[in-house]
Amino acid sequence: MTQRKQWTAQEKLNIVLQGMSGNVRICELCNDHGITQAMYYTWKNMLLSQETKIFERGGIDHGQQRLERENKKLKETIGELHLELKKTTGSQETTQADSVLPCPAAGG
């Protein structure tokens, strides 16, 4: 059984732009790339539905970039805190486990 190709976003864009240029027939383009015409038109519709977002604020989603930076910073902080916690509790973990008292038996 053959495995289907995983197309990158850039490859999809290039195929759709080739089709939109009008220099090649869509059926030939699809045959050349081994995709169905339905797939081509799905990709084309995806591109056209997002066209205005490309030009908004220079094509950069600043809110998304800010969230990604914040997420990265939080992950780094969590990692640092985790390491610090391991350092400070590493030797105490065994003594804490030994000092845990069992629960008293009910009705006893």
Image (tube, helix red, strand yellow):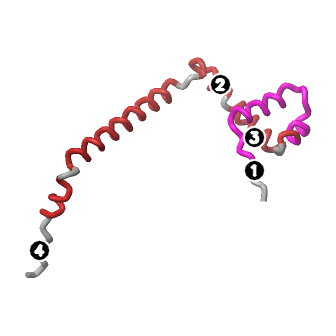
**Quarter-wise, where is residue 101 in the image?**
bottom left
Q: What residue type is labelled 3?
A: Thr
Q: What residue type is labelled 4?
A: Pro
Q: Are marks 4 and 3 in contact (CB under 8 Å)?
A: no
> Does the magenta portion include 18?
yes
Q: Main secondary structure of the magenta part?
A: helix
Nearest-to-viewer mark from 4 and 1: 1
Which residue in the structure is indicated by mark 3? 42
Which residue in the structure is indicated by mark 4? 104
- State which tag comes first along the sequence, 2 or 4: 2
**Quarter-wise, where is residue 30 in the image?**
top right
Q: What residue type is labelled 2?
A: Thr
Nearest-to-viewer mark from 4 and 3: 4
Picture coordinates of residue 59, whole percent (x, y): 60, 22
- State which tag comes first along the sequence, 2 or 1: 1
For label 3, the SS is helix
For label 2, the SS is helix
Q: Residue 4 carries which label?
A: 1
Q: Do the residues labelled 1 and 3 touch (CB within 8 Å)?
A: no
Structural distance between the alpha carbons of marks 2 and 3 = 18 Å
The residue under the point 91% across, 38% down is 28
- State which tag comes first along the sequence, 4 or 3: 3
Structural distance between the alpha carbons of marks 1 and 3 = 17 Å
Q: Which residues are drawn in magenta?
A: 5-31
Quick check: 79 left or right of 23?
left
Picture coordinates of residue 57, whole percent (x, y): 56, 19
- State which tag comes first along the sequence, 2 or 3: 3
